[in-house]
Image (cartoon, helix red, strand yellow):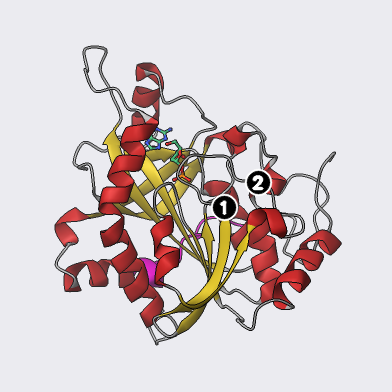
Amino acid sequence: MQDQICYDNYKNSADWLQSRTKHRPKVAIICGSGLGHLANALESQDAFPYSDIPGFPHCTAPGHAGRLVFGVLRGKSCVCMQGRFHMFEGHSLYKVTFPVRVFKLLGVETLIVTNAAGSLASSYKTGDIMIIRDHINIPGLGGFNPLNGPNDERFGPRFPVMGAAYDKDLRRLAWDLGKKLAISDHVQEGVYCMVGGPNFETIAEARLLQRLGVDAVGMSTVPEVLIASHCGMKVFGLSLITNKVAMDYEDQQVVTQEEVLAVSRKKSHTLQTIIMELVAHLGSSTA
Ligand SMILES: O=P(O)(O)O[C@@H]1C[C@H](O)[C@@H](CO)O1
Ligand SMILES: Nc1nc2[nH]cnc2c(=O)[nH]1
């Protein structure tokens, strides 16, 4: 594969970071659009602009600050991506997922992914939070997969299974936390679908995805989950529902990226609260 990334590049980046921070995180968090505020909650921060880190791509999507922040969240050492890389920015899937393998080499065991997404499930409301139970990888079904090319056994097997990519115990814990925080009316669990973007769905595409069993659709997350699961990390994912996807030609709602960002910024606090509680419980008998 033309631009596949070799082990030494991931290692070089991990060594660079380890020589500049005392933190040794076991948890990594990827912040979706408008959700980067979470990184500000980290204590004893060491922050690095992506442009300084060897091998890291540059962040061009709106609502993604482009910084890697190490610190302590609820007593746990974490590393937080304040902004991610998307295929629609023109990055290869190897670049999109580059940080995840760097996290593996840093010793990360649990990856938490977040995103902004449009809902297809009729019962979902804007502002709801969806625990990701499973995914559909539309680019992947068409052959675009970050695991394409020669397999590096140091990361994982040639043919990884994906039937249980989203950790069951962490999903259950998130449900319990939703109840404890009295927000369970706004918590859902469902199937996330990645499309390539950058355009939003046509009406016919939206209807197709709904028939396929998709509850929420976005343009990210799945490549990172594939790479994390391949190398044996526990994965937990949340989608913030920023809009309902138009399903009808008469529908007057037209989604815009401004609306996506405005809703995710407005509702990010709830998502952050769940993540902070979840991180606090990591390592207990249930997580
Ligand atoms: O990084 P995320 O997935 O939150 O980025 C947002 C949501 C869609 O993927 C895309 C268009 O809204 O940007
Ligand atoms: N593809 C897609 N991505 C989104 N991200 C946030 N909302 C949407 C949406 O409606 N469709």
Residue pictured at 25% horizontal, 17% vertical: 248
Task: Residue 230: tell me if it is visible.
Answer: no
Q: Is residue 261 depicted above or below 157 in this figure?
A: above
How far across and how far down the image is residue 285, in percent? 39, 87
Q: Is residue 63 left or right of residue 140?
A: left
Q: Residue 58 bears which disc, if any?
A: 2
How would you rate the neighbour count of disc 1 (Cα within 10 Å): few for under 14, some for 14-19, many for 20 or more? many
Residue pictured at 63% horizontal, 60% vertical: 100
Q: Is residue 67 left or right of residue 201?
A: right
Task: Residue 105: tell me if it is visible.
Answer: yes
What amino acid type is highlighted by mark number 2?
Answer: His
Contact between marks 1 and 2 (CB within 8 A): the answer is yes
Closer to us: 20 or 80: 20
Closer to us: 287 or 3: 3
Q: Ligand 1 is in which quadrant of the figure?
A: top left
Residue pictured at 29% horizontal, 67% vertical: 273
Residue pictured at 43% horizontal, 85% vertical: 75
How far across and how far down the image is residue 92, in percent? 70, 40
Question: Which element type, helix, strand or loop, lies under badge 1?
Answer: loop
Does the segment drawn in magenta span residue 14? no
The image quarter containing residue 70 is bottom right
Magenta region: 161-172
The image quarter containing residue 252 is top left
Q: Quadrant of the C terminus?
A: bottom left
The image quarter containing residue 270 is bottom left
Q: Is residue 57 depicted above or below 199 in this figure?
A: below
